Amino acid sequence: MTSLTLPPLRAAAGSVRLPGSKSISNRMLLLAALAEGTTEIRDLLDSDDTRVMLTALQGVGVGATPIGGTAWRIEGCGGVFPVKDADLFMGNAGTAIRPLTAALALSGGHYRLSGVPRMHERPIGDLVDGLLQIGADVRYTGNPGFPPLAIHPASIKLAGPIRLRGDVSSQFLTALLMALPLTEAEAVIEMTTELISRPYVEITLNLMARFGVRVEREGWQRFTIAACQRYRSPGVLHVEGDASAASYFLAAGAIGGGPVRVEGVGRNSIQGDVRFADALQKMGARIEWGEQFIEASAPLSGRLKAFDLDLNQIPDAAMTLAVAALFADGRCILRNIASWRVKETDRIAAMATELRKLGAIVEEGPDFLAVTCPRSGIPGTQSGAAPTLVPNAAIDTYDDHRIAMCFSLAALGGVPVTINDPQCVNKTFPDYFDALAEITAPVIAIDGPSASGKGTVAERVAAALGYHYLDSGSLYRLAALAATRAAVSLDDEAGVAVLAASLPAIFEGGRILLAGDDVTDAIRSEEVSAGASKVAALPAVRAALLARQRAYRRFPGLVADGRDMGSVVFPAAMAKVFLTASAQVRAERRYKQLIAKGMPANMHALLQELQERDARDAQRSVAPLRQCDDADLVDTTPMNIEAAVEAVMTIVKRQRL
Ligand code: DC
């Protein structure tokens, strides 16, 4: 078993670009496959569950080809799958097996669908009952009511309405709705129970409409698909960011200060889970909505309020609320969540067990959960009184991506938290922990002028703490060298920015490679130093390097050195240090370094060059070199390296308390 131990996290701020929505990705893939014409789907989620769907579609003869980045081209088969006999593996993807079962049952072939053992415990009987009513031949080859299934050709007859239960999973209705237009007859579905998770059915109806099929809906009771409607490709489609995945980051903003912005969903989203932001708002969080973003910050009072909510409409995002409840000021009740019991695992039981490991008092019912977290009453975290979480809890994840993701937020309670089998996030969000690190991992920013010793100090501090290290100056040096090699003038702002945005640079065991060429020493030459200082004054170059620098922020933490680490790149850094020394002493250090390397050096020229570079770095219009108001000054003029490291470690230890 692998595990990931998250360090105690103090704060969350920044922005995250969301991966594509799983619900939308898998629906679009199937609709594009069933349609007439070719569909280009952009921003498709790349994860286990979408790969299951893509592989299955390819398995029944649908042309599905990646066309660069996260875009795919799907050749629609007009409702007739070319391959008539296939074994299809569905993993644990409910959004794949349910709609595919319905579509395959109406398409006149022999298909066998199976999945991982947990998939064989997840119900599908209500859907199969619905399909049997119209003459489909679907058989259980394991336990009745559950996959695996065998499907055979049958003559489909749509006489009266199909009567369907909607209280176990809304995916059964979604599956029938998506498949029924294949019959080209009028089809009516009548719900025999209340329908849960309705927002997911709205996604289905919305996407079917984009492919040209309209469904008449009478409340949530009766759905009619008029005869002779066929799916037609709308051409190019774009997948929204995943609103369920957004919940983790929004909650992080509400718990850890914020603001945290998620990019890729906004006020016009078709996903019900964006309503999670309303639930956070009820807890007192501050929420801002944009066209393409949602942003969350902690309440002004600093304290998240307890809640009692019916969460039937947002079952997935609701799990995040169960962990946010640890940070609330009282007993929180999550109601009407019975569907949790038949998801990737029995989520009610699993959440109760794991929340208790963190010290919460949890009451568990057939369809509810109540969570109370003991509090110290001592103001500690950004949300006011700190919850007293049990440190070093080892959270089991039950092969359930959402358990891994939501429990990572417990580390914002200032305790280390271990997530067992963290790779289960691959189901919907393979880069989850990197994205979380980009808004929460502790950063120590060390800025200062050239040759102040900050590089050596930063590297040693990183080693002492076991943190990652970013030498941001090397990126400007690489940009200058790449420009010179490509014969791009260092004054050509746009030209250098393009090169900087996609530097083919690799940092490997102390060596730096540029397009495979070892340039570790070359980028330290006086010529490249001067060039770096020039390109660093170009706003477009700085902008082009911003995301790359921020991506170095990983668990357990980062030490970053440069000129604007504390002011621009990591403004919310845990500790900020301004490391400097007199120009004379810095020139002497550089002189000794060059001589030691057997390189030519002239003390007078070095001093002059250093002063010119200082002036250029300090006077440029963007991100000029200066000490931030909230940075601690360390003047290393009288210090050796050990003393400088010691001085920085003292500052860091003070911040970590
Ligand atoms: O730290 P260094 O000497 O390797 O930096 C090389 C040049 O890049 C220097 O002129 C300043 C510039 N730089 C910058 O503007 N911002 C940073 N974060 C790092 C370096």
Image (cartoon, helix red, strand yellow):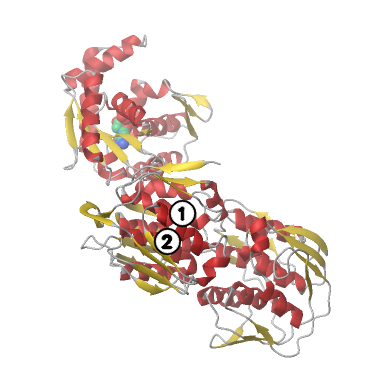
- Vertical side of 595 occupied by 116: above or below: below
Q: Secondary structure at mark 1?
A: helix
Residue 219: % across, % down: 53, 88
Q: Nearer the viewer, residue 324 or 363?
A: 363
Q: Residues within 10 Å of mark 1 (few under 14, many from 20)?
A: many
Q: Residue at x 39, y 44 (%)?
A: 392
Task: Give the residue at x 27% y 17%.
Answer: 590
Residue position marked by numbered label 2 in the rendering: 320
* Image: 139 above or below 472: below
Taking the image as drawn, is residue 43 in sight? yes
**Which quadrant holds the N terminus?**
top right
* Residue 159 location, quadrant: bottom right
Identify the residue under disc 1. 405
Residue 207 in percent (x, y) is at 58, 73
Disc 1 within 8 angstroms of ligand 1 (CB): no
Labelled pair 2, 1 in contact (Cβ < 8 Å): yes
Observer able to see residue 182: no
Which residue is painted at 29% across and 39% down in the image?
565
Query: What is the distance, in whole Å, between disc 2 and disc 1 at their CAs?
Result: 8 Å
